[in-house]
Amino acid sequence: MAADVAYNMIVAAEWGIGIKIALIAIVSATLVAVAVLLVLEAVGKRSAAPQSVRTVVREKESVPQAILAADDEPAPAVEETEEISAHAESVELTEGALLVDDRDDGDRGTMIVDGVFVKVRYNRSFRAKLIQSDDTLKGWYSELRNELLRYGLKRRTSWANESWYNGRTTYAKFAIRGKTLSFYLALDPQKYKNTKYTFRDAGKTARYKDVPMQCKCKSARSVRWVKELLAALAAERKRKRAELPEENFRPDYRDTASLVRDTYIKLYYVADTKVSKQQFDEAAAADLKTRDKTPRDFLTKLMRADGETKAHYSAIKNELLRYGMKSRVSTGNESWYNGRTTYAKFAIRGKTLSLYLALDPKEFEGTKYNFSNMSDVGKYETVPMRMKLKSDRSVRWVKELLATLAEKKGWQRTERREEDFRYVERKH
């Protein structure tokens, strides 16, 4: 009621021309000030770092707890210098960001957040390098780790190395640079000059002064030599070798984004963050044309598959060999043939391993077998029955179907020792 009365009084009042002009001027000035503030705020947002990319200055980084194994024990503190980029700022991978590796440079990539491209460099920990290495390197690492355990040594993982020690003495260190696994030993390199062993004296590098003999593991022979040198070091330190069963210490492959989120990899800007969005876009667009987001060849997909998928592949490969078939690897498949006829093909799509068989799917309709008819796909028209290998039961079914195929073709199944085909061995 009071508000209505006040309104009627204002309407009824006769304002002078001067007062009216003053009020209009005040309102206009207020609107102009608000507009200026909004423009300044918009400009400030555009000149800031790319949206959703949070930058943090890390004065001192410690090794993530996830890197330390559960059975590790604290070792003597060792000061280690970490190679970092010239920029002091590291970048955190935020929720919803896409991280794409450069095809030709494994140490660089592009982070895409809200459509903004940011060039980044990776600083990989030892653990990350091992996880993303090929199966051959992982096999050599696993073999040497088993040997170190036989001498009663314990391990400690830092950002750049995996150290093996007893008490307060370090006996050996692993490191990975590029695609090469190196093993550093607490032996005097001078004593082994003019011997059969190939090594480098790394004693001038601070982090390796206590383990100066660097041996590069590039072949089965070099790994054998490392084991001989390790035995010599153990004899020198009067350490006995225990007989322990061989364990598998090969870690499964993981993509870069997951390792960044788990802090096994740090990201650093390659370019200055003040570079314009247009420059970022142009550089990233050029890189995206020459980059694959996922591997296309069968062997790389198999190498990066999880342990269960590799076990299923190994089981079926052993069965195919028992029927006398031979294999041929193409970009997308591993084909199994006899004479000039292909009878089976392996393929990996996404995370699923499949075996395609030269059987007529119509003959098995209404049976217990779960399969797809791929006869309409050109590359599988001669092996149209697709079986997905997702469980032990599906592996058992595939073996039964192989037996059916063998019976149709008159093949004999021979008994042969089960071999381990889980790991892709490539020559370095």
Image (cartoon, helix red, strand yellow):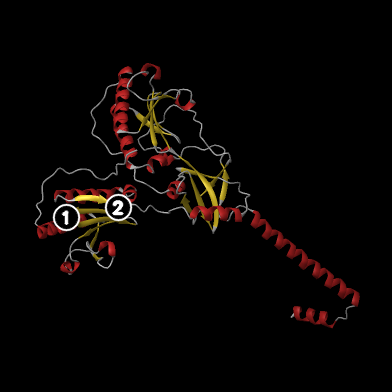
Disc 1 and disc 2 in contact, CB within 8 angstroms: no
Please name the residue that numbered disc 1 is placed on: 399
Between the residue at mark 1 and the residue at mark 2, the CA separation in whole angstroms equals 23 Å
Tell me: 178 left or right of 354: right
At label 2, counting other C-alpha atoms closer than 10 Å, the crowd grade (few under 14, some 14-19, many 20 or more) is: few
- Name the spot of residue 60 as percent of width and height, x first: 54, 37
Q: Quadrant of residue 391?
A: bottom left
Please name the residue that numbered disc 2 is placed on: 330
- Name the spot of residue 203 as percent of width and height, x first: 45, 22
Residue sitting at 32 percent across and 29 percent down?
222
Q: Is residue 382 above or below residue 89?
A: below
Q: Amino acid at mark 1?
A: Lys
Q: Is residue 152 in view from this perspective?
A: no
362 or 104: nearer the viewer: 104
Q: Amino acid at mark 2?
A: Ser
Q: Is residue 124 in view from this perspective?
A: yes
Tell me: 282 left or right of 14: left
Q: Is residue 373 above or below residue 59?
A: below
Q: Which mark is residue 217?
A: none
Residue sitting at 54 percent across and 49 percent down?
119
Tell me: 321 left or right of 210: left
- Name the spot of residue 125 as percent of width and height, x first: 45, 39
At label 1, counting other C-alpha atoms closer than 10 Å, the crowd grade (few under 14, some 14-19, many 20 or more) is: some
**Element type where label 2 sits in the image:** loop
Tell me: 391 left or right of 8: left
187 or 331: nearer the viewer: 331
Residue sitting at 76 percent across and 68 percent down?
31
**Element type where label 1 sits in the image:** helix
Tag count: 2
- Which of disc 2 and disc 1 is earlier in sequence? 2
